Image (cartoon, rainbow, N blue to C red):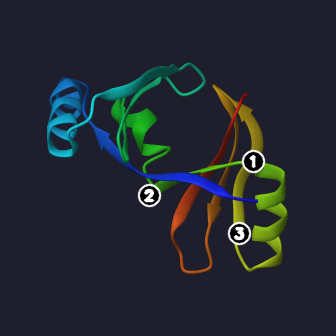
Amino acid sequence: MQVLQHVFRLYVARDKFEHAIAFYERIQGSSCERRVHIPETGIDAAKVGGFLIFTGDPESLARVRDVNAIFYVDSLAAFVQWLNENGAEILAGPRTVTGGKNATVRNPDGLIVEYFEATR
């Protein structure tokens, strides 16, 4: 069981999306690694270094805005079991989503995290 990577989640208006991507590319000295449209939510996302930038209509973003970070993990099932045993609250999932499986969790300290296992 291992956290492979963690990133901050940012939420921006559609008209600010490209500017936000360019800003985080420049500040980190890295290019946008991936862009994806998430059909189940209508949200678009771009991964730039340690940030995942989301855009969509205000209603769509409001439904996911409480999540502060993403932990990319090697085994979602193992993490969900461990989280349950260690005082975390599973808010949603596990479920199959675009690109893999996820669960939304409130860690014991209150931080809300999306735990995500990518499809291999």
Residue at the spot 60% in from the left edge and 24% down from the top edge? 40
Q: Position of residue 28 (x, y in %)?
A: 22, 44
Q: Residues within 10 Å of mark 2 (few under 14, many from 20)?
A: some
Residue at the spot 76% in from the left edge and 50% down from the top edge? 76
- Disc 2 secondary structure class: loop
Closer to the camera, 77 or 26?
26
Q: Which residue type does callout 3 highlight?
A: Glu
Q: Position of residue 11 (x, y in %)?
A: 32, 42
Q: In the image, which disc is placed on residue 89?
A: 3
Q: Is residue 31 left or right of residue 94?
A: left
Image: 9 above or below 119: below
The residue where tag 2 is placed is 68
Q: Which residue type does callout 1 highlight?
A: Gly
Q: What whole-number distance in Å separates the C-alpha atoms at marks 3 and 1?
A: 11 Å
Quarter location, residue 85: bottom right
- Disc 1 secondary structure class: strand
Viewport quadrant of the C terminus: top right
